[in-house]
Image (cartoon, rainbow, N blue to C red):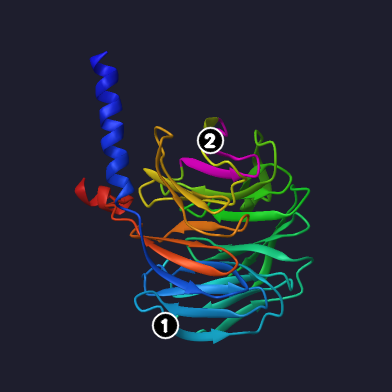
Amino acid sequence: MKTKLLTILLFAINLSIYSQNITESKTITLPGLKCANISPDNTMIMIGKTNGTIEVYSLETGTKKYGIKLQTDEINSITYNKNGQYFLSASTDNSTMIWKCADGKLLKSIKKQPSSVWTSAISANNKYIASGLENGAIKIWEASTVKEYRILYGHSQRVFEIAFTSDSKYLVSCSKDNTIKIWDYAQNLCINTLKGHENEVRSISISPDDKIIASASKDNTIKLWNLQTGAEINSLRGHTWWITSVSFSPDAKYMISSSSREIILWDTESGNILQKVQAHKDVDNVNVRFSRDGKYIISYDKNCAKIWTTGLIFSTLNDNKKEK
C-alpha cells in the first residue's frame, strides 16, 4: 500500500512540474500555412505555405526576415542538415529544393520527380538527400551533385515522412499503407517492415541513439519499436483523434505528439502523459516537433505557428561522452 501511494505521489509531483514547464511564448499568424520548423541554432522559424512560398521569421522577435518563392505548389515539409547551414523544402509540384538558411539563396534543385514530394531529409554525413513521394517510392540523390543514387520501392501508397539514422547507415519511412519500413539504402534493400498500426502512419521519429522508432498513426496510437529487431516495445493511447506527428526530445526521455487541437508531452520509458495542452483551434491539421536542442517546441495548424518554451534540461549523447 505504501509503495502504491508513493508511486501515485511521485507521478502527481511529476505532472505538476511539467504542467508549469511548457509555456506558449510566441504566435505567428499566417493563413495558408502548411509546414514549419525551427532552425537548429534557434534563430529562425521556417514556414512553408500552400502557395509554394517559404517565409522566414526571427524566433526571438517574430518579425519576418525574408521570403522566397520558386516552387509553384504546397510546401509539404522543411528539414535541415545537421549543422543548420541549409534546409530542404519538399513540394507538391514534384520538386525538392536546397536553400541556404542565412539568406534563402537557392543552392540546388531537384525537379521533375515522378509525383508529389511529401517529405525530404538529408543524411547526417551530408552525403545523401532523400525524398518520399506520393506514389510510394523513395528517391535518393548524392547531395553534392544531385545525381540520382537509389530508388526504393516497397510502399504501396504515399510516403508521409522519412528520416536517416544518426550514423547515416539506414533510412526509416512511414506511409499511408499503414507500415513503417527500415532501409539499407546503400544496398537498395528493405531490411524490415513494421506492421501493427491499423491505419495510415503519418509521422516517425528516431531516438538520437538510433535504438527506438516512434510512429504516429491515424489509428489514434503512438507505437515504439526496436529499430534493430523491429519488435514493438509499447503502444500509447492518449489522443482521442488521429495523430499527425511525433517527435523525440534530444535525450529521448520525452516525446511530443499532436492531434486534433491538442499536443501531448509523454514520458518515453513509462508511457505516461506528462502534459496535455489544447494548443490550436484547427481540427485535423496540427503538427508539432521539438527544436534540435529541446528548449523549444513548435506547433502549427493551417493558420498559425506557435512557439513554446519547454523549461526542460536535457543531457545529449555528446554530453554523456564528455562525462565519460
Residue 188 lies left or right of residue 304; in this view the side is right
Q: Quadrant of the C terminus?
A: top left
- Residue 262 vs 115, above or below: the answer is above
Q: Secondary structure at mark 2?
A: strand
- Which of the 4 image quadrants contains residue 134? bottom right
Sequence order check: which comes first, mark 1 or mark 2? 1
Give, as a single range, the part of the protein colored magenta: 211-231
Q: Amino acid at mark 1?
A: Thr
Whether residue 60 appears in magenta in the rendering, the answer is no
Q: CA distance from mark 1 to mark 2?
A: 38 Å
**Does the image show residue 145?**
no
Q: Amino acid at mark 2?
A: Arg
Please state the horizontal and vertical placement of residue 299, each as a whole percent of the image: 48, 61
Report which residue position mark 2 lands on.
Answer: 237
Crowd tier of the residue under label 1, counting other residues whose Cα lies within 10 Å: few below 14, some 14–19, many 20 or above = few
**Does the image show residue 185?**
yes
- In front: 244, or 27? 27
- In front: 25, or 100? 25
- Which of the 4 image quadrants contains residue 269? top left
Residue 64 lies left or right of residue 142; in this view the side is left
Report which residue position mark 1 lands on.
Answer: 63
Residue 96 lies left or right of residue 62; in this view the side is right
- Which of the 4 image quadrants contains residue 284? bottom right
Q: Are marks 1 and 2 in contact (CB under 8 Å)?
A: no
- In front: 71, or 60? 60
